[in-house]
Amino acid sequence: MLDKKIAQKIADEVMNTLGYNINVMNKNAIIIGSGSPDRLGSFHETAMFAIQNGITCEVTDTQSKELRGVKPGINLPIVDKGGEVIGVVGITGDPDEVRNIGKLVKMTAELIIEQQETMNRFYSHRNDKEIFLNTLISDQQSISEEEIADWGERIGYSMESCRVAVILSFGVDHKTSEKGKLEKILNQIKLSDSHLKDDISSVMSGGFILVFKTLKRTEPWEVEKTISTYLDVMKSAADAKNMQCFVGGYYLGVKGYVKSYGEAYGMYRSGIYKNNQHVYFSHHHYLWRLYNQLDKEAYTLVIEPYIQKIQKYFGKGTEEAMITMRKIFDYHFHFEQVAEDLFVHKNTVIFRKNKMEECLGFSLKCNGHDNLLFMIILNHYEKLKKFKDSPIR
């Protein structure tokens, strides 16, 4: 397609390279790109003849005086890849002087148009892919599973392939990253041998990269192997130290994409990240699934009242107490390791645990029945604190 923007680009680039004045006419012989702004929008009689006959037309000084909107020079038809004349490029000057560069100018114009069309197809495909991907992960799909599968096939994905959702976050302190930075990282990933043509990937508006990674085997341990190999390419990247990866489980059918993404996104938004851990698989964190599936009433009437009770009981020491409890669970009730991590005495750790049990009214011990309730309380507290300290972007 030859529009005003491309036409002016042709005129500017050819003029800057060769030094001759250039006019570019559309298929109606109207000048839409020119080194002489005063000629824009005017009709070019010789260009119309070149378009109608598909031939190069030369105009001498004498002939130009008898024609409408024409100056001496040479006018060459611009032909697209399908062989259709879509416009004309004209070079102002004595035909004997500009004749030899005519083919070069014509070739340059057609090359610029072809490059622009390639870019347009690229962005059109990317936008189509982003819309498809957002439809794929939506839990309120407006079209049928068959239509989604057909859509995926049309844009080049085998929808019979097995995939799991992988969310990649590169923000320092778990803050979202700029889209340009993420695009650069995703392009680096795509260049690796481990990124397959059938992998569906995009930078998401939430500030992370989403990949539906294609699998050969779907057993949990095989998923771990595939993802570990896939992430190897990022180990040398400058942002690797800040990377957090959240991997959903494998599920059947189109609805499986929604489930897998829901698990990955649930872990990503949970706010529970460990300093020495970068990859989280949903089958190792079923607590997150339970946590995300509790209804709002459970949080409002059960979990949040417990949090308020803890805050009232500990006051300014609430954060210190909750961090200690997190460490106790992370280290599986090995108080010596907790004390070493927090740089406090072992008795201080035990004292804080006992105070928490006194506040809650139930005991917390390794493999205790009430541990699940407290873990949900702790997770919800940390999530609320995270969103209070770092507003959702």
Image (cartoon, grey):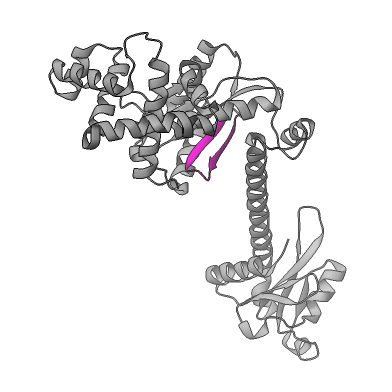
Q: Is 85 on the left or on the right of 110, as rendered?
A: right
Q: Nearer the viewer, residue 255 or 335?
A: 335
Residue sitting at the far left:
345
Residue 122 rendering spot, x and y as whole percentages = 64, 47
How many numbered marks are there?
Answer: 0
Q: Which residues are magenta?
A: 199-211
Dominant secondary structure, magenta: strand
Quadrant (top left/top right/bottom left/bottom right) for the N terminus? bottom right
Residue 155 at least partly seen: yes
- Can you name the residue that lies furthest to the right here? 53
Residue 20 screen position, x and y as percent:
59, 75
Looking at the image, residue 279 lies above or below residue 311: above
Q: Which residue: 60% across, 13% down? A: 217
> Residue 338 appears at what percent x and percent y?
22, 18
Q: Residue at x 81, y 72 (%)?
A: 50
State the image coordinates of residue 144 (x, y, percent, origin top left): 78, 34
Front one among 77 and 249 = 249
Residue in the foreground of this view, choosing between 124 and 143: 143
Quadrant for residue 318, please give it.
top left
Above or below residue 51? Residue 365 is above
**Looking at the image, which residue is at 18% across and 13% down?**
336
Furthest-top residue in view? 367
Tell me, yes or no, whether the highlighted magenta stretch contains residue 201. yes
Tell me which corner region of the image, top left, top right, bottom left or bottom right, holds residue 368. top left
